[in-house]
């Protein structure tokens, strides 16, 4: 007899090791093709994730959602185990707001300079840095406004 579970084991790993691991009711991610919400007993799948914020809803309803900023990666869900291997991942609670705002400002300056120099490659590189900083600030804002 197959048992139907009511939760997921969510684990997020970056090159620096395990960033996040918890049991959850659901997990929302942004793939390169759009957003999806993973619920318990989801079919097995793998997909590529975009620079985005992973939103994990904990088992206890009174607890706020957890926000984890990632710079893209790979998601695998199988047997209620959701694993995300990210290029970079940081829990919103661990984000340094001032440092991230400085990174945002530097990325904006690099974009302006690349535009002046008409350097498309440098412009796209700075644009990605900007997206990463904005993503971290968004995760930070959501976590602290709950």
Image (tube, grey):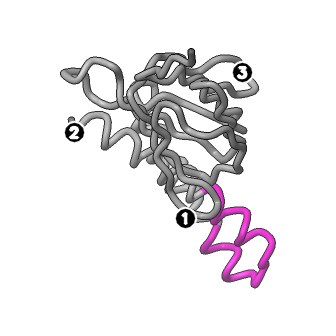
Residue 137, position as x, y percentages in the image: 41, 46
93 above or below 29? above
- Disc 3, SS: loop
Residue 86, position as x, y percentages in the image: 69, 36
Q: Which residue is mark 2?
A: 145
Tag shown at residue 37: none
Residue 53, position as x, y percentages in the image: 48, 44
Give, as a single range, the part of the protein colored magenta: 111-129
Whether residue 103 is in magenta: the answer is: no
Comes first in the chain, label 1 or label 2? 1
Q: Which residue is mark 3?
A: 16
Task: Look at the image and tell me in which quarter the C terminus lies.
Answer: top left
In front of the other: 126 or 12: 12
Q: Residue at x 26, y 34 (%)?
A: 144
Q: How many marks?
A: 3
Q: Residue at x 35, y 23 (%)?
A: 58
Q: Residue at x 32, y 31 (%)?
A: 65
Task: Look at the image and tell me in which quarter the N terminus lies.
Answer: top right
- Disc 2, SS: loop
Rendering quarter of residue 12:
top right
In front of the other: 33 or 108: 33
Q: Which residue is mark 1?
A: 108
Comes first in the chain, label 3 or label 2? 3
Residue 135 lies left or right of residue 139; in this view the side is right
In front of the other: 120 or 12: 12
């Amino acid at each position: 007899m197959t048992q139907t579970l009511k939760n997921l084991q969510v684990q997020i790993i970056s090159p620096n090791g395990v960033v996040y691991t918890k049991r959850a009711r659901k997990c929302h991610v942004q793939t390169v093709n759009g957003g999806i919400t993973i619920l318990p007993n989801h079919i097995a799948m793998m997909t590529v994730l975009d620079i985005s914020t992973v939103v994990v809803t904990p088992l206890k309803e009174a607890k706020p959602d957890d926000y984890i900023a990632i710079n893209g990666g790979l998601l695998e869900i199988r047997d209620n185990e959701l694993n995300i291997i990210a290029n970079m991942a940081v829990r919103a609670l661990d984000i340094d707001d001032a440092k991230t705002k400085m990174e945002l400002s530097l990325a904006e300056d690099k974009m302006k300079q690349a535009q002046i120099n008409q350097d498309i490659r440098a412009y796209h590189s700075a644009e990605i840095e900007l997206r990463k900083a904005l993503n971290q600030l968004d995760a930070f804002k959501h976590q602290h406004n709950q």
